[in-house]
Image (cartoon, coloured by chain):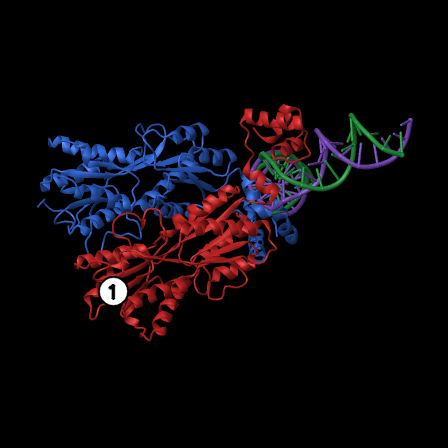
Chain colours: A red, B blue, C green, D purple
DNA sequence: TCGCGTCTTCAAAGCGCTTTGACTACGCGG
DNA sequence: CCGCGTAGTCAAAGCGCTTTGAAGACGCGA
């Protein structure tokens, strides 16, 4: 059943039927009611394809998931971010168009989505300090928003958290407890969030006159295994750190595993602070040992970023929108003065 | 730049240009070369919207992510499944159309995607023993494939793993080691995979004359916290089990946390077998303690299911496609005879 | 020279909507 | 009784592709 058939069956023109269904005011009360009833009865659904062509909109937002590194890892935060964003999109009638591509191919993937007109806006995740995707998107003239930012976050819209300040606070907290050898188990250097966290960490140390030691700073893809391996190496080495600052709770789980394998208890023999994205399947609340953590909900970020993006789509001429979220430092059981 | 303008600039008709670009044979060698060069030079990309309307295809596959339960949890395996599927789709020019919906609304979401013609096929994940989505999709006449199956898996295409056999094997392995009190920390009852795993577990116990005890069987959303809470309760209770069979590695991490908090070491004081989906950020290989596990790559499953779906789309009249994968039981460090 | 098959190319008709501009009917004030 | 504003409806023109059916150009054998 298409619009024309529905119109014929009602003895009306497609124009009137279309307007009745889409809520335009130029349709009489009774006519509208008749049309709605007939559409309902016939189980009529307008063709998205035709509507997209006619309106010039796609009612879809482009997301690109890059597979990181040689082992093509999916960033585990994407699922919850998508869930948050999806909620906001759904509320406004947008769908997600998702592309999964190899590392380094995302700029091309965005470009293709936009050129083809498959999307009305684009979401960028995990920006690097200098991210080529941003210039590509600027030049394409498509609304987009970045979750995170680059080194020079000007001329585009973004939503980010106070990474630097959070890690400075966390480091200061450990320093206040008396720790001096604090390791940083960070994400990959190329990502801007990792650089900012490191900045916060180093600034706190420097302020207190504690030397920044390269041997205590690590960066890699934040898997559980990375946390385990790094902590294992540190704990087995000379002068092991008394505290560790871990950029992901998943890696922190690996750190805990390494510690416990050595009979060390977190919060007694080793202090750990991690960043908690509030992943839905990895909660840091409830009974049992909880991590002291810098906490910010990735799901809320997804939701808000999506809302901002929709605002940009509706008002393309607007100035860039930016939001910078404070991050809580939440006390758990994994921090204590060094023994 | 659209097709008509490109054609005009070449002094050709849109017909010829369209055919030249799409590789149809009715175009002369030299003309084709000219067209390709001009399209390249003008950076011409055909409008996906127009193409979809003209061809009647959407070149997209519908995926729906349900938010499970009151706390709206995202199944952590979805990300890796998507990554695998996305790879296969990309190879054939398909995109993913993703919808995130509340628990219980997925049937409606699928229905809407299909009725609107936004997708050419549909992927169903996490089927329940009796899943209404399957009847809806059958009646809609759209190609679809189910990752997993229902109790009566007939009349549709699916890809599943040997859940029953895997859990029977795992249980037998624990029985062979001498365990008699084996707990099952399973996924939610309503899901078919959980029921089949439980079947395998109970069959193995019954075969050996070991009574099935309701107090040792649990089912819930498989978070880390669920593993922790359940293991904690069991270990603190009377007659704690000497072994646990856990349906997800994430929950198994929680089990490990509960055990270690009580000074129990996995593989010495408590045996644990979990199911390992080979999530990219939670590897069960490498150094340190690894779980004895039933292993099957969720990413491979995604890739293969996507390939099967594309086959179905290309040949709509074909009989249902089904695949049932064997599951490895991989020896790790977390199993030993009871003390 | 004619007719016919082959190779290229094209005009035009969709695909199923939205939206513009025009038209009709009606009521009301002048 | 006329003119005009307003509400309701419609015909037709897009949106930018693909695809059908037809036709022109060309070469070759009869």
Residue A45: image location, x then y, percent = 54, 32
Looking at the rendered structure, the secondary structure element under dot 1 is loop
- Report whether B120 appears left or right of B244: right
- Report whether A312 appears left or right of B299: right
Residue A151: image location, x then y, percent = 46, 66
Looking at this view, is B13 or A112 the one in front? A112
Image quadrant where residue A262 sits = bottom left
Number of numbered tags placed on the structure image: 1
Looking at this view, is A232 or B296 the one in front? A232
Look at mark 1 in the image and give the residue it sits on.
A337
Residue at image coords 65%, 54%: B9
Looking at this view, is A135 or A87 the one in front? A87
Q: Residues within 10 Å of mark 1 (few under 14, many from 20)?
A: some
Image mark 1: chain: A
Image quadrant where residue B242 sits = top left
Residue A225: image location, x then y, percent = 26, 57
Asked if residue B292 can be seen in this view, the reply is yes
Asked if residue A190 can be seen in this view, the reply is no
Residue at image coords 42%, 31%: B137
Residue C8: image location, x then y, percent = 59, 47
- Report whether B28 appears left or right of C1: left
Asked if residue B204 is positioned above or below residue B294 in the image, the reply reads above
């Amino acid at each position: 059943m298409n619009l024309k058939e529905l119109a014929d069956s009602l003895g009306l023109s497609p124009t009137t039927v279309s307007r009745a269904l889409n809520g335009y005011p130029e349709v009489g009360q009774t006519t509208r009611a008749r049309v709605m009833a007939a559409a309902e009865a016939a189980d009529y659904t307008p063709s998205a394809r035709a509507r997209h062509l006619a309106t010039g909109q796609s009612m879809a937002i482009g997301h690109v998931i890059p597979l990181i590194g040689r082992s093509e890892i999916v960033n585990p935060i994407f699922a919850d971010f998508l869930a948050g964003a999806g909620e906001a999109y759904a509320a406004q009638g947008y769908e997600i168009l998702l592309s999964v591509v190899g590392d380094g191919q995302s700029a091309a993937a965005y470009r293709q989505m936009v050129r083809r007109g498959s999307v009305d806006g684009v979401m960028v995740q995990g920006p690097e300090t200098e991210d080529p995707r941003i210039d590509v998107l600027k030049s394409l003239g498509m609304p987009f928003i970045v979750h995170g930012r680059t080194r020079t976050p000007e001329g585009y819209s973004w939503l980010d958290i106070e990474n630097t300040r959070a890690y400075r606070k966390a480091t200061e907290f450990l320093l206040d407890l008396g720790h001096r050898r604090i390791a940083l188990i960070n994400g990959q250097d190329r990502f801007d969030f990792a650089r900012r966290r490191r900045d916060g960490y180093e600034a706190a140390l420097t302020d207190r006159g504690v030397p920044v030691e390269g041997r205590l700073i690590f960066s890699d893809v934040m898997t559980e295994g990375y946390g385990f391996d790094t902590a294992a190496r540190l704990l087995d080495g000379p002068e092991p750190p008394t505290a560790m600052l871990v950029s992901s709770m998943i890696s922190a789980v690996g750190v805990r595993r390494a510690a416990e394998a050595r009979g060390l208890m977190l919060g007694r023999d080793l202090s750990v602070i991690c960043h908690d994205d509030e992943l839905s399947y990895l909660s840091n609340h409830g009974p049992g040992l909880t991590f002291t953590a810098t906490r910010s909900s990735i799901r809320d970020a997804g939701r808000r970023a999506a809302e901002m993006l929709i605002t940009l789509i509706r008002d393309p001429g607007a100035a860039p929108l930016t939001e910078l979220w404070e991050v809580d430092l939440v006390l758990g059981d994994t921090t204590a003065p060094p023994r």
